[in-house]
Image (tube, rainbow, N blue to C red):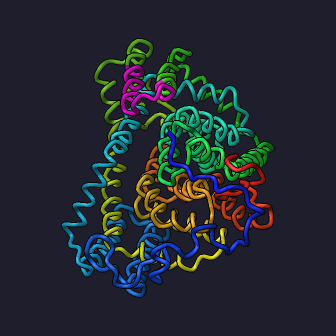
Amino acid sequence: MDAPQDKDRGPQAGPPPDDAPAPGTADERPDAAAGTPSGTEPEGAADGSGAPAPGLAASLVPMAAVVAILVGGIGVLQYPAELMLIFAAVVLALFAARQGRGLSTVLADMGEKVKRALPAILILLSIGMLIGTWMIAGTIPLMVAYGLELIDPSYLYVLAFVVTAIVATFTGTSWGAGGTVGVALIGVAQTMDVSVAVTAGAVVSGAYFGDKLSPLSDTTNMSSLAAGADLYEHIRHMLYTSVPSSLVAAAVFLAAGTAIGGAPSDLGAVDATVDELHGLFHLSPVLLIPPAVVLVGSLMRKPPLLVLFASSLSALLLAVAVQGFGPSALFDAAVSGFTADMLGAGAVSDTLTELLERGGLQSMYNSAFFVFCAFFFAAALENSGVLRVLLSRMIARLRTAGGLVSATLLSGFAIINGTSNALVTYFLVNDLYGKAYRRRGLHPVNLSRSMEDSVTITEVLMPWTVSGVFFATTLGVANFDFLPWAVFNWSGAVFSALIAFLAPLTGWFGVRRLGRAAEGRPQGAD
């Protein structure tokens, strides 16, 4: 899709000093004339809802309490994330009430957020059903058997990264890639007795590499739209951070795999698992029809729910035609998840039991409930006004491109952890920083890339976000366990900030400016 683009202002002699405003934007704007920097709010000013905005000192108190509850309660004490989100939301709701916004307003906003997120909630439940049906059809067992027969343990991590990245790029969905090939790769890792945490980190890295760079991805489209950047210029500009991040990730996964190369897994146990899979299921290439349905449907841009349902239906038909299961087992697998007892084959090894028993709509019920808790927190945070006050004060003190990009990255990460909704976060970040980027003479693709590096690919790392809950539930690995190994997801922001700080020294390499030669190429190139 095409978003409005800025007009070329003609060639310039060269980039101005890093602290100079863009031509024609200096102090003619109304907010500058009024003595209030754009993007800031004076204490006590109304925020658009009619209620006064809280002051800086007052905003620090509830925000400190929220950070303590989330980080201390979830990260340190390992308390249930749902309960901690509710506690944090209550703190913010009480603060919002002091600002003139009652609990009814918070709950009404929560209802609006849930309504907008309903498609994502339905997709969450549908992927649970997909996993259960793929399991009873033999699709996931087939993929695991192929993986065990073909993959050298030394290369499992890097292949998990590459394969998941390819699937996510073609389908445009990190959830779809993680919930399909990601589950199979985790099964391979369990059977080979290699690190499940590293494998999960590789799967998450690959899933978000593809999601970030795919023109089919909703987050890629919406981040460019929110910032006012052309979709394909946005994708090309992201290569400056995505390529080095992916190379670092691939090198880490290759090194981690090489480290286990000297102590290969028990090949006899692997062979025994493959033989057991062949004994429990009729494995043949026809069982790859359900993944093919997902791939083709995604490429044809069909509605995700329709694609997932069609894939699940094809898996159920294969479960009857190939595996010989009856209707009762089919419905149980789709709703409650697949269990080893359904095989009726006597004792099943502990390794395969752990691999096979997963999926079903009910496996995602806790995640769906978590969404409601997350949006209660998001509504309370929004109505409290504290985050906007704190960020606007920070924006007023930014003087360099590196500082502006770094602030955008930190703000994006903070907001996505509060809202758990990437699409809302994109527009909020643009509302906070869009004018600042234009005043600095920075093209919208810089803002859209910062959104992706701080929002799209980092949301999954925290256990209290919707994507974080989805991947932890689907892969069976806790967020903080795979976080160190999700190298692509946390290194993107590092490269984004580094490129911005070094831009004045590198001829603005990787940073596109308005009305000037962009990144060493003619204006308009990217």
Residue that sits furthest to the left in the current view: 104
Relative placement, left or right, of 492 versus 128 is: right
The secondary structure making up most of the magenta span is: helix
What residue do we see at 46% from left, 76% from top?
31
Q: Nearer the viewer, residue 251 or 446?
A: 446
Residue 517: percent from the left, percent from the top?
Answer: 73, 54
From where the camera sits, is residue 189 visible?
A: yes
Q: Report how many numbered discs are placed on residues in the image.
A: 0
Residue nearest the observer in this picture, 45 or 212: 45
Height in image: 445 above or below 503?
above
Q: Is residue 498 left or right of residue 65?
A: right
Q: Splitting the image into 4 quarters, where does residue 129 fall?
A: top left
Q: Residue furthest bottom?
A: 57
Magenta stretch holds residue 307: yes
Residue 359 position by quadrant: top left
Over which residues does the magenta segment extend?
Answer: 297-316
Q: Is residue 339 magenta?
A: no
Query: Vertically, is 231 above or below 22?
Result: above
Q: Which residue is located at x 62 percent, y 45 percent?
A: 233
- In this rendering, the answer to whether 353 lies above or below 286 is below
Q: Nearer the viewer, residue 354 or 106?
A: 106
> Residue 332's spot in the image, x, y percent?
31, 30
Can residue 482 be seen here? The reply is no
Q: Residue at x 38, y 79 (%)?
A: 62
- x, y percent for residue 24: 59, 67
Tell me where residue 273 appears, x and y as whole percent. Answer: 59, 29
